Amino acid sequence: MAEAIPVPLPTQSIGGDGPRVSRIGLGCMGLSGTWNPTEVGPDHRRRAIVAFEAALMAGITLFDHADIYGGGSCEALFKDCLHAVPGARERIVIATKGGIRLGYYSLSAPYLTVCVEESLTRMGIDYIDLYQVHRPDPFTHPSQTAGALNELLRRGLIRAVGVSNYYREQVRALQRYLDVPIRSNQIEISLARLDPIYEGLDGGDGTLDQCMALGMTPLAWGPLGQGVLSGAHPHPAGPERGEALRTEIAYQARQYDASSIQIALAWLLAHPAGIIPLVGSTNPDHIREAAAASHIRLAREDWYRLWVAAWGRQVP
């Protein structure tokens, strides 16, 4: 039997000249299916490998982790995934994060170094393609965090630096002390959360504007609104807003011969900042469905129709 060939997806570089990846990434927070590492067994391992193989075959090459996902079990199972597919490590980009401890954050140099070394051990790899500090730590000066990252880069344990959940001034403060450009900012953004779109929009924080100004790539966590877009959870602005948004998404899904999930992802993909949605699923069908969204090209008018429905008002 001929070897199956992965479906090619559109690609882009992370942070301008950073690693090149598929325009859809797999968020691995639920890879083990549990937040209790002691519960992980053979069935969890099989499901993780099936999900990994489905992502590879769908053309996904970016896999996003964090040391706290599954209490470390997601990274540990990823080692099994890599072993199950010979040569996979050379074909993909592995991102992971660190700095969150039980009840507090720590981006101190000693702890961040331990985070990286332990992630490498759990995944059984020699280097991390993109290392992101998970949350800003107000109790650590950014010069100390940057010092640790600079040393980890020098040692070859990480190859690029990113941040996660950082606001504009937090990015600027860390960048001042880093020897390399910050390549990414992993943020929550979806049609159910518009804050990063631009500064001045109902509390908008300007994150995407900064990404474009500095050449950083936004990695979108929660790109499907964490259940809001499907109706599984109420829209924060009320049921009427949620219904109006879902109605518009469904209308465009019919127009583009796509699913509602694909339209919601295509809306993010169309933004000029080069957003990469991180889809968190271990269901092979859902993974394939999400990956196919990267082939949809929304018209400008349709992008704005979705934005208006999500915003709840007309463009002035």
Image: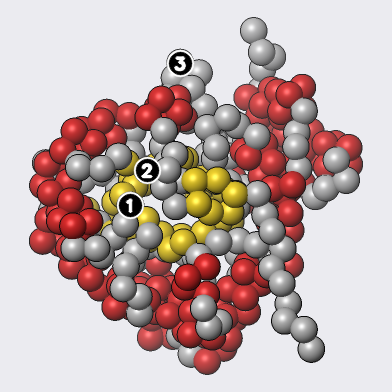
Neighbourhood count class around disc 1 (C-alpha, 10 Å): few under 14, some 14–19, many 20 upward:
many
Left or right of 72 in this view: 271: right
Q: Nearer the viewer, residue 205 or 63?
A: 63
The residue beneath circle 1 is: 160
Q: Earlier in the sequence, mark 1 or mark 3?
A: 1
Image point (12%, 49%), residue name: 147
Disc 3 marks which residue?
200
Q: Circle 2 is placed at which residue position?
A: 183
For badge 1, the amino acid type reads Ala
> With respect to residue 202, does 133 lie above or below?
below
- Where on the picture, by quarter, is residue 312? top right
Which SS class for mark 1?
loop
Q: Amino acid at mark 2?
A: Arg
Tell me if residue 139 can be seen: no
Q: Earlier in the sequence, mark 2 or mark 1?
A: 1
Label 3 amino acid? Gly
Q: Is residue 157 above or below residue 146?
A: below
**Residue 209 position within the rendered picture, expressed as x and y whole percent measured from the top left:** 45, 25
In the rendered image, is residue 147 in sight?
yes
The disc, 2 or 3, on the residue closer to the chain's N-terminal end is 2
Query: From the viewer's perspective, is the residue at label 2 or at label 3 nearer?
Result: 2
Dot 3 falls on a residue whose secondary structure is loop
Is residue 290 or residue 40 the one in the foreground?
Answer: 290
Across and down, in percent, residue 260 comes to 77, 46
Position of 128 with respect to 109 (left or right) is: right
- Badge number at residue 187: none
